[in-house]
Image: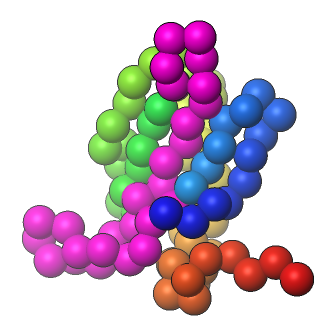
Amino acid sequence: MYSYVKYADETEVVFSNIIKNEKGEEVIHVHFERPTENGFDSVRFELPSCKILYKDGNYTDEEIELFRTVVERGLPSFYRWAREGGIKIA
């Protein structure tokens, strides 16, 4: 997994290499996770469909829709960075 961003509420966003799903399609998983007193709030999207693969915890519907916007708008960049081995920061 490659680090993408960490938000002020401690939500960390990471993304996977390009992997093949059960249909043989190239996909990327983008995972949002925030620590809580009892574990983590988590949601994982699969690109390019932007469907939710996993959701657990207390992210609000509004937060999840914001995350969906992040993955939809960043889709080409996530694929490029996955091919390049992560985000290169000088």
Find out whether residue 27 is within the magenta segment: yes
Q: Which residues are magenta?
A: 15-41
Q: How is the image coloured?
A: rainbow
Q: Is residue 68 visible?
A: yes
On the rendered structure, is 54 left or right of 78?
Answer: left
Whether residue 58 is situated above or below residue 50 in the rendered picture: above
Residue 22, position in %: x, y?
11, 66
Q: Is residue 21 magenta?
A: yes
Looking at the picture, tell me which residue is in the foreground, 71 or 57. Answer: 57
Instruction: Please identify the quadrant where the C terminus is shown.
Output: bottom right
In the displayed image of the protein, which residue is found farthest to the left?
Answer: 23
Q: Residue at x 15, y 77 (%)?
A: 24
Q: Is residue 61 above or below residue 8?
A: above
The residue shown at (49%, 63%) is 1
Predominant secondary structure, magenta span: strand
Quarter of image, res 60 = top right
Residue beneath the point at 51% across and 25% down: 41
